[in-house]
Amino acid sequence: MARPASSCTQKPTLQFSWPGSGKQTCHVFITQVGPQLIDLITALWFGFVGACVGSFLNVVAYRMPLGLSVVWQPSRCPNCKRPIRPYDNVPILGWLWLRGRCRDCQAPISPRYAVVETVVGAVFFLLAYGEVFSGGLNLHRGPLTDLTGAWHTVWNPYWPLLVTYAVHVTLMALLTVLVLFSLDEMSAPRRFIGVAVALLAGAAIAAPGVWRHAVLAPGVDEPQLAGALVVLALGAAPGASLAWMSRRRAAKRSALKSPAAAEQFNAAIAVMLLGMVVGLRGLATATLPGLAALALFAAQRGRSGARRAALSAAVWIAALVQILFWRPLIDWLWS
Ligand SMILES: [Zn+2]
């Protein structure tokens, strides 16, 4: 079948053309390829920031259970204790160009550091596209704006969107640390839980509007401060109860320090933090991807990582899916 030769159906191309003849190409570049390039560069920048955050989370997961300061000490090689040079501390790349070994003593550095940096960087990258550049299309009461693309949302900042993004990547960062605690067979320290709850509650106080997507009552559109805090507290309740029950059960069996008890507790805390951000209905919706992830891990029982952190990793995946597909999931399940 012959297609009409319309310029609108042309794919954007980057081709060299002589001045005068290239008007069309130039137009296509500016209106289509240009914004996509700005999006990509911006998303890569967000991803780099995410990798740096991942690098910090590695430090948090390593030092917090030991009661060390997470901020006021430079990174050191755990083997020879020499400080890591700033240029070797670049996320992902540092590990790659050292080939996973300490520059001073050649002791192997676990690939886990680079993996965590990559995963957190990828989350920042994905959510930049799914949440920011889309104008909040993923959100329960989205989109927040008709403007799309990095140019209109980031470089000319649209703050409601950027603050929402900040809250959601913070949640994913906190859940990442919980998975790392589980991999290390440790319960989340109280200090970590305190900081996590304070961060999210602080965000709800500073930007209650972000919690409008978590509101259960259909009439409430823009929760004020009290409303956001109620939504946050209600969402926290199931996870907090689970955490309390898991502690009680472990204490009865005097197994508070067992890896299984630690993992159950960490997963319950993850459910609590997720509920604080997505609310009760979001939490109910997230059980679906959560169960799917658990089934996936169950199929990999042989792997020690899947055994040690399956529950908290399932909550991590459920949280990412819930945030990325918040509106379609809720529309599909609840309407
Ligand atoms: Zn060393």
Image: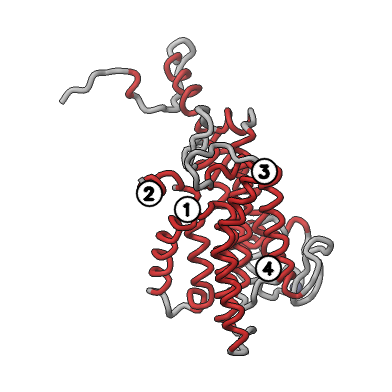
Q: SS for tag 3?
A: helix
* Number of other residues with Cα within 10 Å of mark 2, as a class: few under 14, some 14 to 19, many 20 or more: few
Number of the front mark, 4 or 3: 3
| Callout 4: CB less than 8 Å from ligand 1 | no
Q: What numbered label is drawn on residue 225?
A: 3
Q: Earlier along the polypeptide chain: callout 4 or callout 1?
A: 4
Determine whether label 2 and label 1 are within 8 Å by CB: yes
Q: Earlier along the polypeptide chain: callout 1 or callout 3?
A: 3
Q: SS for tag 2?
A: helix
CA distance for labels 4 and 2: 37 Å
Q: Which residue is mark 4?
A: 61
Q: What numbered label is drawn on residue 334?
A: 2
Q: SS for tag 1?
A: helix
Q: Earlier along the polypeptide chain: callout 2 or callout 1?
A: 1
Number of the front mark, 4 or 2: 2
CA distance for labels 1 and 3: 20 Å
Q: What numbered label is drawn on residue 281?
A: 1
Image position of 100 (left or right of 287): right
- Residue type highlighted by circle 3: Leu
Which quadrant: the C terminus? top left
Residue appearing at x 59%, y 83% in the figure? 250
CA distance for labels 4 and 1: 30 Å
